[in-house]
Image (cartoon, helix red, strand yellow):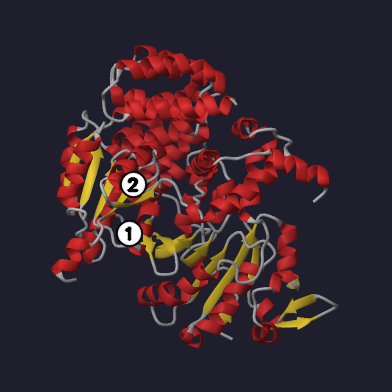
């Protein structure tokens, strides 16, 4: 039979040796694999958030970046969320989506920042922030989005908010939705999105 | 395929966007204009569909969780010939100046800035995918 | 079904849009993706769960689901995945292995290097045994190579069952009579034991996907089958598992997920490989540097 069974692991199965220095030092190694191992060997404790955030700032290799983000998610405290916030503004679309994926994984840590993110000067940040609202309890989410719709001037941000409303909007949101539709009458997409949301919420209310 | 047969063939488009609302919006507009339309929620579903059907055009949103639009486009451009040369229309947001450079570098044929009107969508899709019968 | 259950079911109406909302939610939470061809199936499962939770409307059920009180998400995923294990489950991936993956694997290794295939989680062993049987039945090159198959799980009771190799009729339902006769012997009525030679050639070990040191003992794996487990994990655990598996794979090695699963943040770690029979994910042969 061609199947073999090896109960004593061969040397190639052995644990990969650690880097020469401590994990924190290896975070700065020029070698991708060294940095990868360093990040993964750091315990998920709050005291390491600053080092991980600094590493994230420098990191260019996608898989190491993901490992750093995993580490931050596992720590999952406010400091972690705070470390990730600047990446919502990154030039690179991949980095922005990495940051939002991470923040979505830690709704409790992100909650204190929501109001300010939804009011950020950068419309792209506001758009990303509406995604985070999905993970919040329905009432909080609806009231945050209603506040946003009442004052938002950018159609894409409204569109993103309306999209989230479709999943969890309550009838309380209907006035704000109608007002928004009126403000943006004749523009592409948004009237379509809002009428869809209104119909969905009205049907859901029974 | 003979030129005459090609002219009569319904053009088909794949919409790749994580927003079901946006997909619905484009789908309706494109179908009304005579295109055959399919949807994918992410780059992986899109990859599966691209290999399963012959599309004349992909419409890809730049901001998608999981596998962002540019990663997907780069991935497509690395594949075998007929897929590597598939026309791709990317939907971006206005603030993303580097996005547009990156999109061009990745091999996107054209980009449009959200929100996209139905008329603009049809005009550009027709230009890139061909006129439906 | 009892008549009061039939009445309850008749009262529940679920629209196509409700199903769409549900699928989007499940996709965002778990990475499971369902296409239109599965809609009727999802409808049935959703109705089941609504009855089970005594939800009077989709809205009520959906609110319950979103809050995940009483682990409804897990119950729903169980309903969707038909949480039942049997031989030759999702055999299109086994076909992909023998039609495509192994050719690639062999071309990347020295002639006498062992081919290492890992079933993780292996549950009660149906998957690793299926891999072994499939290889022997379908891979022409099977006798020219040494193949090591490992089955691992966090559940020691399941592992004990796997090591014993005794199965009922249901587990064998997809196997032809010829295969049953070749690889199993009947015990008491409706019960079969896997051939002892085959049974003893597979190593079963306890492993926790999210325990990095535990996973670190496995290296240079060529193919990992990790099906229908990541969908149950939260984001942090899913990412950690994906990273741990990455380190276990040889560069160029493959990971197969469950049929409806997609792995998030995939492109940073793995290449998406599309073969005729399946989509699988490949650890790159080398880093591409920063992009």
Q: Is residue B88 above or below residue C180?
A: above
Residue under numbered circle 1: B50
Quadrant of residue C102 in the image?
bottom left
Q: Are marks 2 and 1 on the same chain?
A: yes
At 29% from the left edge and 27% from the top edge, which residue is drawn? Answer: A89
Q: Nearer the viewer, residue C35 or C280?
A: C35
User: Mark 2 touching mark 1, by CB under 8 A?
Assistant: no
Q: Position of residue A98 (x, y in %)?
A: 37, 38
At 38% from the left edge and 19% from the top edge, which residue is drawn? Answer: A117
Q: Nearer the viewer, residue C154 or C234?
A: C234
Q: Position of residue C252 (x, y in %)?
A: 38, 65
At 47% from the left edge and 28% from the top edge, which residue is drawn? Answer: A199
| One can see residue B64 in this view | yes
Structural crowding at the residue carrying mark 1, measured as other residues with C-alpha within 10 Å and reported as few (<14), some (14–19) or many (≥20):
some
Residue under numbered circle 2: B16
Q: Chain of mark 2?
A: B
Q: Is residue A57 above or below residue C187?
A: above
Q: Nearer the viewer, residue C148 or A18?
A: C148
Q: Nearer the viewer, residue C165 or B107?
A: B107
Distance between the Cα atoms at labels 2 and 1?
A: 11 Å
Q: Is residue C122 above or below residue B98?
A: below
* SS assignment at label 2: strand
* SS assignment at label 1: helix
Q: Chain of mark 1?
A: B
């Amino acid at each position: 039979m061609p199947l073999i069974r090896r109960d004593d692991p061969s040397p190639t199965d052995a644990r990969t040796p650690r880097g020469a220095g401590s994990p924190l030092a290896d975070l700065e190694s020029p070698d991708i694999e060294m940095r990868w191992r360093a990040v993964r060997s750091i315990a998920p404790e709050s005291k390491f958030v600053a080092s991980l955030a600094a590493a994230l700032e420098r990191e260019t290799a996608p898989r190491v970046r993901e490992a750093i983000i995993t580490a931050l998610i596992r720590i999952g405290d406010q400091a972690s969320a705070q470390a990730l916030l600047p990446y919502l503004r990154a030039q690179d679309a991949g980095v922005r989506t990495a940051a939002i994926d991470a923040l979505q994984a830690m709704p409790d840590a992100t909650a204190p920042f929501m109001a300010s993110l939804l009011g950020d000067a950068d419309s792209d940040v506001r758009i990303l922030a509406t995604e985070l609202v999905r993970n919040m309890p329905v009432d909080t989410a609806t009231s945050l989005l209603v506040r946003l719709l009442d004052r938002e001037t950018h159609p894409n941000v409204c569109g993103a908010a309306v999209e989230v409303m479709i999943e969890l909007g309550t009838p309380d949101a209907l006035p704000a939705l109608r007002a928004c539709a009126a403000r943006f009458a004749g523009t592409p997409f948004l009237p379509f999105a809002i009428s869809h949301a209104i119909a969905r919420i009205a049907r859901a209310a029974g | 395929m003979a030129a005459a047969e090609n002219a009569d063939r319904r053009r088909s488009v794949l919409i790749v966007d994580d927003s079901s609302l946006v997909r619905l919006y484009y789908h309706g507009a494109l179908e009304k204009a005579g295109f055959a339309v399919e949807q994918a929620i992410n780059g992986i579903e899109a990859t599966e569909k691209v290999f399963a059907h012959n599309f004349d055009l992909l419409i890809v949103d730049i901001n998608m969780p999981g596998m962002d639009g540019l990663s997907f486009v780069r991935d497509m451009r690395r594949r075998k010939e007929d897929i590597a040369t598939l026309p791709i229309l990317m939907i971006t947001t206005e603030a993303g100046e580097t996005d547009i450079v990156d999109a061009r570098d990745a091999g996107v044929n054209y980009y449009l800035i959200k929100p996209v009107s139905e008329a603009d969508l049809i005009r550009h899709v027709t230009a890139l995918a061909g006129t439906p019968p | 079904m009892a008549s009061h259950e039939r009445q309850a079911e008749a009262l529940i109406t679920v629209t196509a849009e409700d199903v769409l909302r549900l699928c989007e939610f499940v996709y965002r939470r778990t990475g499971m993706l369902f296409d239109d061809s599965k809609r009727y199936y999802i409808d049935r499962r959703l109705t089941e769960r609504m009855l089970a939770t005594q939800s009077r409307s989709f809205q009520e059920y959906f609110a319950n689901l979103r809050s995940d009180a009483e682990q409804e998400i897990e119950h729903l995923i169980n309903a969707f995945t038909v949480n039942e294990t049997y031989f030759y489950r999702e055999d299109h991936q086994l076909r992909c292995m023998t039609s495509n993956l192994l050719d690639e694997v062999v071309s990347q290794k020295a002639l006498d290097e062992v081919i290492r295939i890992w079933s993780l989680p292996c549950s009660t062993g149906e998957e690793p045994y299926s891999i072994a049987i499939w290889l022997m039945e379908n891979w022409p090159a099977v006798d020219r190579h040494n193949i090591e198959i490992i089955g691992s799980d966090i559940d020691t009771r399941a592992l004990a069952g796997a090591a014993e190799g005794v199965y009922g009729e249901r587990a064998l339902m997809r196997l032809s009579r010829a295969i049953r006769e070749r690889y199993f012997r009947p015990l008491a009525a409706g019960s079969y034991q896997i051939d002892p030679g085959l049974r003893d050639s597979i190593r079963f070990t306890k492993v926790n996907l999210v325990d990095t040191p535990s996973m670190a003992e496995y290296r240079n794996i060529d193919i990992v089958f990790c099906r229908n487990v990541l969908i149950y994990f939260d984001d942090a655990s899913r990412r950690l598992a994906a990273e741990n598996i990455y380190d276990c794979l040889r560069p160029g090695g493959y990971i197969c997920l469950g049929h409806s699963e997609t792995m998030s943040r995939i492109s940073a770690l793995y290449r998406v490989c599309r073969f005729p029979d399946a989509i699988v994910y490949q650890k790159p042969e080398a880093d591409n540097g920063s992009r």
